[in-house]
Image (cartoon, rainbow, N blue to C red):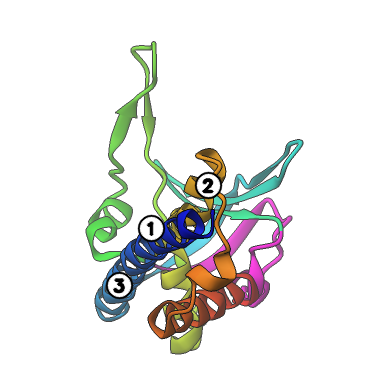
């Protein structure tokens, strides 16, 4: 019995190290994408943008969608109720006003769509109708104001790094052992400095995700 537990612990360690590495690769990719975005994003000013924000409250969570429209273009960001953080709190605008004057940034690939009022369209499922794609915005502020570069960086990272994918990758070893009902002493299996360091990085990332 003890031998079987040792074998299971070894397997768990291999799986844990694998998915910890996959999470680290994904996190580095998100950071790299954010570093590219921070030097290439473009600022746009909108006067009298229509506020079409909405919220949805379900059994498990509340989803808030902040969305603004001008012409044919819609910009939007979606947040969980508890994951809005400082990036939303620092906007400094009246979130309930019907029309607002705002400044914001968009990624390079979306800039021409906004400036030329020509969004891309996707066909709706089981319908011939098409719907304009919403464009993600960053560093939103009152008109003619700009955010702190650090806050803007974290706002971009918040978008580029999917918290759902991050959690799934990091906790996959636990999920696998639960599904296959393996009897493992996790405390003995996770005696790895490598995994410990990644766990600290993951915890800091998760904390900053909710804070900022």
Residue 82 occupies quadrant: bottom right
Closer to us: mark 3 or mark 2? 2
Give SS at disc 3: loop
Mark seen at residue 121: none
Give SS at disc 1: helix
Residue drawn at (32%, 69%), measured in percent from left and top?
21
Q: Badge 2 is on which residue?
A: 182
Instruction: Tell me how far mark 3 sits from mark 2, CA to CA.
Output: 48 Å
- Total of numbered circles in the picture? 3
Along the viewing direction, whichever of 1 and 41 lies nearer the viewer: 1
Instruction: Tell me how far mark 1 sits from mark 2, CA to CA.
Output: 10 Å
10 Å crowding of disc 2: few (<14), some (14-19), many (20+): some
Residue drawn at (48%, 78%), measured in percent from left and top?
191
Mark seen at residue 11: 1
Along the viewing direction, whichever of 137 and 159 lies nearer the viewer: 159
In the shown orientation, is residue 202 left or right of residue 111? Answer: right
Query: x, y (%) of residue 183?
Result: 57, 51
Q: Earlier in the sequence, mark 1 or mark 2?
A: 1
Task: Kindly indicate whether the residue at mark 2 contacts the one at mark 1 (C-beta within 8 angstroms).
Answer: yes
Along the viewing direction, whichever of 21 and 148 lies nearer the viewer: 21
Q: Earlier in the sequence, mark 3 or mark 1?
A: 1
* Region in magenta: 82-105
Query: x, y (%) of residue 66?
Result: 59, 53
Query: x, y (%) of residue 161?
Result: 42, 64
10 Å crowding of disc 1: few (<14), some (14-19), many (20+): some
Q: Tell me if residue 143 can be seen.
A: no
Instruction: Tell me how far mark 3 sits from mark 1, CA to CA.
Output: 44 Å
In the shown orientation, is residue 136 left or right of residue 113? Answer: right
Give SS at disc 2: loop
Q: Is residue 27 magenta?
A: no
Q: Badge 3 is on which residue?
A: 41
């Amino acid at each position: 019995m003890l031998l079987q537990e040792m074998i299971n612990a070894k397997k768990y360690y291999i799986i844990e190290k694998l998915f910890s590495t996959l999470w680290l690769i994904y996190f580095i990719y998100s950071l790299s994408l954010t570093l590219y975005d921070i030097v290439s994003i473009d600022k746009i000013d909108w006067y009298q943008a229509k506020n079409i924000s909405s919220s949805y409250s379900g059994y498990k969570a509340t989803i808030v969608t902040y969305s603004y429209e001008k012409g044919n273009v819609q910009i939007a960001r979606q947040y969980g109720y508890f994951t809005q953080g400082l990036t939303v709190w620092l906007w400094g605008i009246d979130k309930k006003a019907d029309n607002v004057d705002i400044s914001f940034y968009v990624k390079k690939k979306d800039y021409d769509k906004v400036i030329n009022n020509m969004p891309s369209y996707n066909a709706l499922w089981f319908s011939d109708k098409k719907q304009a794609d919403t464009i993600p915005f960053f560093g939103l502020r009152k008109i003619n104001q700009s955010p702190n570069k650090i806050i803007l960086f974290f706002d971009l990272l918040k978008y580029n790094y999917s918290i759902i994918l991050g959690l799934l990758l990091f906790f996959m070893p636990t999920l696998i052992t639960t599904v296959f009902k393996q009897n493992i002493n996790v405390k003995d299996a996770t005696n790895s400095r490598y995994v410990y360091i990644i766990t600290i990085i993951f915890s800091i990332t998760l904390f900053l995700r909710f804070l900022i």
